[in-house]
Image (cartoon, rainbow, N blue to C red):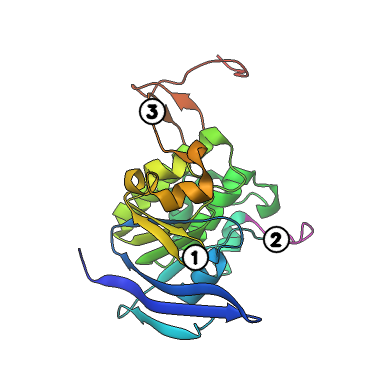
Amino acid sequence: MTNALISLDGINKNFAGQAVLQNISMALHQGQITTLIGPNGAGKSTLVRIILGLIKPDSGSVTSAENLRIGYMPQKLHIDPTLPISTCRFLQLANTSHKACHEALLSVGIEHLAETPFQKLSGGQMQRALLARAILRKPNLLVLDEPVQGVDINGQNALYKMIADLSKSLNCGVLMVSHDLHIVMSATDQVLCLNHHICCQGRPEQVTQDPAYLDIFGQSALYAHHHDHHHSLHGEVLDADGVHQHGEGCDHD
């Protein structure tokens, strides 16, 4: 395993006398996709804010690699619907060049939407635009908060595959925050289950058999991912040879 991009040791954080994080120790590594899961109110957002350096822990240490560059994809983003801003111009708010914006949009498969008003993007297109913004500065760590929010089930697999491909092409580590207990398990190297403390961690198939995980999520969350097809970036179902499968609701030949 390579040296950690960022490591946390014995992190504790309280709010209003309530323990939100207790003795959190973890590390994120280059080339590894780590998924953080847990119930609502488990402290996931607080942990992400500590990793991003937005808040400080009450105790414990955070150690970052030299020249660490973090790309962050928020869970939600609200833009005034009356604001005249294109998708490319939205990316340029990060003080990057027009060329860099188009390259980022190309990387996530929506370069054809560069001049589309940002507010008119669909849920899946919006998530890809946010992902494009996160990779603008060629980060060595991507932090993605609910990256498939607002994306239909067919498009989620394609987005997770895109994240895996970006991790390889950028040679970066990835931290994903997710409440999805099925699809995300096939798209990650390591899982951290958080409920104010780290209940369990390891490979997906290990974590989903752990009693602490089952206590939180129940037997219905048992992981078994069998996939006999693929998805295009637009969420279309493809067979093993990459051919679009027509079915109910398909309105083209």
Q: Earlier in the sequence, mark 1 or mark 2?
A: 1
- Above or below 56: residue 86: above
The majority secondary structure of the magenta stretch comes to loop
Which residue is under mark 2? 78
**Classed neighbour count for the residue bearing mark 1: other residues with Cα under 10 Å, few (<14), some (14–19), many (≥20):** many
In the rendered view, does 193 fall on the left or right side of 127? Answer: left
Q: How many marks?
A: 3
Secondary structure beneath dot 1 equals: strand
Name the quarter where the N terminus is drawn: bottom left
**Classed neighbour count for the residue bearing mark 3: other residues with Cα under 10 Å, few (<14), some (14–19), many (≥20):** few
Residue 231 percent across, percent down from the top left: 45, 31
- Cα distance between the residues tagged 3 and 1: 30 Å
Residue 2 percent across, percent down from the top left: 21, 66
Q: Nearer the viewer, residue 125 or 218?
A: 218
Q: Which residues are magenta?
A: 78-86
Question: Label 3 amino acid?
Answer: His
> Which residue occupies 38% across, 41% down?
186
Which residue is under mark 3? 227
Which residue is under mark 1? 72
> Which residue occupies 33% across, 21% down?
241
- Above or below 118: residue 184: above
> Which residue occupies 46% across, 46% down?
214
Residue 53 shows in this picture: no
Question: Label 2 amino acid?
Answer: His
- Indicate whether residue 112 is drawn in magenta: no
Secondary structure beneath dot 3 equals: loop
Q: Earlier in the sequence, mark 3 or mark 2?
A: 2
> Which residue occupies 48% across, 62% down?
134
Res 187 label: none
Question: Label 1 amino acid?
Answer: Tyr
Name the quarter where the C terminus is drawn: top right
